[in-house]
Amino acid sequence: MNVSQKFTLEDLAKSSYPIIWDTCVFSHPIGEQEKTNLKDRTEFNVKRNAFLQEFKRVLPKSQFYVPDTILEEMNAYYLRLKGVNADNSFLWVRKYVLQLQREMVKGRKLTTGISYDLQEMQRAVDFTNQGYYLALQRQYGSFKNRFEMSEADFDFLLSGLILAKKHGHASLVSNDFGIINARNELVNRDEISDKNFSFLIKRDFFVFEDISVVRSYKP
């Protein structure tokens, strides 16, 4: 993939090599967060569910992977969302509340369905007990503090690296700046090359951009 290129979800589904997905790209594009205004929050959930629905549709023909730790975060995401209450509200407010409630239920079902499909297709990976993973963990353990990475972030990075070396090429999809910079450091240390370990960010709900040659990425 060239750095200037942008891709749709359909484009990524046609890839012949593994594409590994981070939790954040299932929820929002880069620079965009959960909305607080009721109308905007409802519209945001409609767009997110459209993405989840399309992801589920293209998944069987794709090479999409998710580490087990990311799968756990995905399933926990909707448990953390705050509910909404339509009691004692104006009619127009109740309309959006009820629509938002429907979209949240739909989102939970889609996420559960994607999680199930990934496991059934053996696309939920866990390398944590393998010798090579443990060696990488010891070698690059300092990345967690240096790049402010959680255990799930670190597992995502190492899982992607292992898949890239196994298949000759893999691509990470994430909006996490720590992971972006940690991946770049792996390339700088000649652990793997740009062309074999690409990185995409989610620009819009259905638009992804390759930023593989960016050496320092900050919010």
Image (cartoon, rainbow, N blue to C red):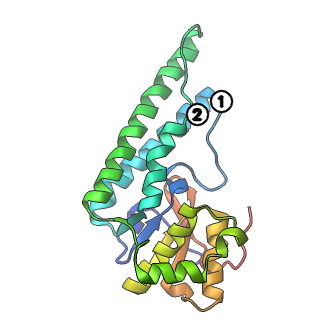
Q: Is residue 186 above or below residue 143?
A: below
Q: Quadrant of the C terminus?
A: bottom right
Relative to 39, residue 134 above or below: below
- In the rendered image, residue 155, in percent from the top left (x then y), is placed at 51, 68
Identity of the residue furthest to the bottom in this view: 190
For the question of whether residue 179 can be seen, the reply is yes
Compared with 25, 98 (above or below) is above
Q: Residue at x 52, y 86 (%)?
A: 195
Question: How many residues crowd mark 2 within 10 Å: few (<14), some (14–19), many (20+)?
Answer: some
Image point (32%, 66%), residue name: 62
Which one is nearer the viewer's eye here, 134 or 99? 134
Q: Amino acid at mark 2?
A: Arg
Q: Quadrant of residue 36?
A: top right
Amino acid type indicated by mark 1: Asn
**Where does label 2 land, which residue?**
41
Secondary structure of the residue carrying numbered label 2: helix
Residue furthest toward the top? 88
Q: Where is residue 1? Give x, y as percent.
A: 50, 79
83 left or right of 8 in image: right
The residue wearing badge 1 is: 37
Q: Nearer the viewer, residue 14 or 173?
A: 173
Q: Residue at point 64% right, 45% down?
A: 33
Secondary structure of the residue carrying numbered label 1: loop
Cβ atoms at labels 2 and 1 below 8 Å apart: yes
Query: Which disc is residue 138 wearing?
Result: none
